[in-house]
Image (cartoon, rainbow, N blue to C red):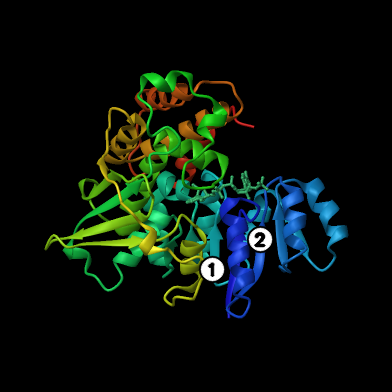
Amino acid sequence: MKRISIMGATGSIGTQAIDVLKDNRDQFKLVSLSAGRNMDKLREILKTVEPEMVSVMDDGDRKALASEFPAITFVSGESGLDAIAADDSDMLLTAVMGSVGLAPTLKAIENGKDIALANKETLVAAGGLVMNAAKKNNVNIIPVDSEHSAIFQCLRGERHSEIKQLIITASGGSFRDLSRAELDNVTLADALNHPNWAMGRKITIDSATMMNKGLEVIEAKWLFDLETDQITTLLHKESTIHSMVEFVDNSIIAQLGNSDMKLPIQFAFSHPDRLPMDNPLDINALSQLNFKPMDFERFKMLELAYEALKIGGTMPAVMNAANEYAVDRFLKGEISFLDIEKIVELRMEEHEVIGEPDLETILHYDKLFKSNMR
Ligand SMILES: NC(=O)c1ccc[n+]([C@@H]2O[C@H](COP(=O)([O-])OP(=O)(O)OC[C@H]3O[C@@H](n4cnc5c(N)ncnc54)[C@H](OP(=O)(O)O)[C@@H]3O)[C@@H](O)[C@H]2O)c1
């Protein structure tokens, strides 16, 4: 029985992961989980599963829950996330939103846990540190992002030296059919209306700006150890092909599936095995699959992410922090959609890069660029 912990259990990925565990109680045991501030969702979850330990952000919430659920140990704050990272599970699913996942993920790796990685901001901010720590501690990092899970599945049994390129598909997000000029007047509600996927608010906005694809390009570089020019992106509005790998003999292998995160979550948990699932893709109902080259002028945020990756050092962490800050302000209704891009570009222009930063330096810049966030 594999013992699993979940960081970010009340979120979109976290709740789907709980469903996967409930569907496979004979395979997996939930050891601990963390929530942020959504106590209604947490209470709902705790009525259906029995973790040994639960971490919440606020100590007041911890006290209230401890008297309601006496069989569970409750912890709180940053030390609460550290306690989850140090529990005796075999695998930690990192599904918190943003770079808050970085430090506890590194702690879990140092504790020898395999990582099911949904939290892409961790690798964007500190890919080198995380992958080196994983190597040193003999820890597997199994991607949960559907694109990276697809690539991971396409690469099973293949040789790294025979990869020509990764082709990461992009739905185009909520505004894929709008011109740049039309983006001037879009609203928050429009931006949150993703055509294919139901996800958390931050990643839905990142999909609309195409920063999500930029974060995924950086994540792919670290996960699959390739040169930047070996990672390409392609518009594919159906999101049926989750990504592809082209090999040196021009053969292209793709992974297809429904827009359902339970598949990559379950695959990360069960790897190297596969387990049966509901909701198969009806291949007979697929009338057509559309592809369009990526337009970097239209989707400027993707270009900024490639630039940050090429510059390296602290730049991806700064880009990520500026993006988290700007998206948070957009979600609060304080800035316009196109202001997100302006803020990220300006912060990148102003930043004096430090090469090969340590964790302290990365966390310093992360905090600095997000200091106005709640
Ligand atoms: N959703 C998807 O389909 C999808 C697909 C691929 C990758 N991802 C990646 O997976 C991660 C999670 O995405 P999501 O859509 O599931 O996000 P989400 O729905 O916003 O959930 C985020 C989770 O993180 C918790 N959290 C937020 N801030 C926290 C903090 N400061 N300390 C502790 N916990 C905190 C939230 O707690 P509360 O809600 O209780 O406050 C919630 O449990 C992101 O990195 C995203 O890019 C998501």
Query: Which element type, helix, strand or loop, lies under badge 2?
Result: strand
Residue for point 36% across, 61% down: 256
Left or right: 117, with 290 as reference point: right
| Horizontal and vertical percent position of residue 22 | 64, 70
Residue located beneath label 1 in the image: 91
Packing grade of label 1 (10 A; few <14, some 14-19, many >=20) is many
| For residue 367, side relative to residue 296 (left or right) | right
Among all residues in the image, which is located at the extreme left? 249
Q: Which residue lies furthest to the right in this view?
A: 67
Q: Is residue 85 visible?
A: no
Q: Report the quarter where the C terminus lies.
A: top right
Q: Nearer the viewer, residue 350 or 232?
A: 232
Mark identifier at residue 33: 2
Query: Between 172 and 71, which is closer to the camera in this rendering?
Result: 172
Q: Position of residue 111 (x, y in %)?
A: 53, 66
Judge by depth and name the residue closer to the eye, 282 or 298.
Answer: 282
Please name the amino acid that badge 1 sits on.
Answer: Met
